[in-house]
Image (spheres, helix red, strand yellow):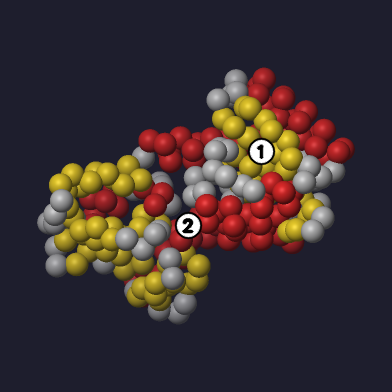
Amino acid sequence: MYKLALVEDSLSDKENLLKKLSQYQQDSQQALTITCFEDGLKFYSNYEPGFDIVVSDIEMPYMNGLEAAKKIRELDKKVQIIFVSKASQYAVRGYEVDAVGYVLKPVTLFTLSELLNKAIKKLTLLNNEYILFNDENGLRKIPIPSIAYIEVRDHDLYYHLDDNKSYRSKRASLSSQEEKLKGKGFSKCNNCYLINLKFVTMIKKDSIIVNNQELPLSRGKKHDFEKDFVSYLGDYL
């Protein structure tokens, strides 16, 4: 059972989305508890973590759904956000809040189903995927989506998290973590750093910006890193 918030001020668009959501549940056998919000400003202003998925219009009175979603992301790293809009120019900006994706109105069942399946897959990973390692205090467990990047230094690994905390694992190899995180949105920018692509905000000529940190990008890794990044970003293009 997944809790879904539907934020839509247009009655006709809301009815269309509810029909599509109902059909999706029948086809996929996924149970959704749906709560509708017609006042987007009120929903975003009073948001509290608890929803699994938010399906939200972007253009609503007194607010922009993208800007409001940035505030949600500060409070809730886990919730999966799907945007709907009549305008295509917002599509790329969904990446700014780590949205699952973006769909144009009128919403089709196929497109919405694809995004919901992706959201549920990401939720499953968030609920079950962790890295276990020994640090100076004992055995530590950290969720994979919270890792901004992993650094190898003097034969030790340093896990740098999205909240700027860091933990050291002694005598561990970066290659072993690269294999473990394969297919989970990570890529090497050089031989010392394994990067979570969702935290990359800029790729420069010979460096990248990840979680507000500038890290070196080697010439030998640049092509593959850019390819991985574009592939990761491809859902929003």
Which residue occupies the extreme right position in the image?
12
Indicate the quadrant containing the C terminus: top left, top right, bottom left or bottom right: bottom right
**Residue 184 tag number:** none
* Residue 206: percent from left, percent from top: 40, 78
* Residue 77: percent from left, percent from top: 49, 50
For mark 2, what is the residue?
198
Which residue occupies the extreme front position in the image?
46
Q: Is residue 187 above or below residue 208?
A: above
* Residue 182: percent from left, percent from top: 35, 48
Q: Quadrant of residue 16?
A: top right
Q: Earlier in the sequence, mark 1 or mark 2?
A: 1
Q: Residue at x 81, y 45 (%)?
A: 9
Q: Residue at x 48, y 72 (%)?
A: 203
For mark 1, what is the residue?
5
> In the rendered view, does 175 fall on the left or right side of 88?
left
User: Please, what secondary structure does the residue beneath circle 2 have?
Assistant: helix
Q: Residue at x 32, y 42 (%)?
A: 130
> In the rendered view, does 94 fall on the left or right side of 167?
right
Q: Quadrant of residue 158?
A: bottom left
* Nearer to us in this view, 109 or 93: 93
* Residue 184: percent from left, percent from top: 41, 47
Indicate the quadrant containing the N terminus: top left, top right, bottom left or bottom right: top right
Amino acid carrying label 2: it is: Lys
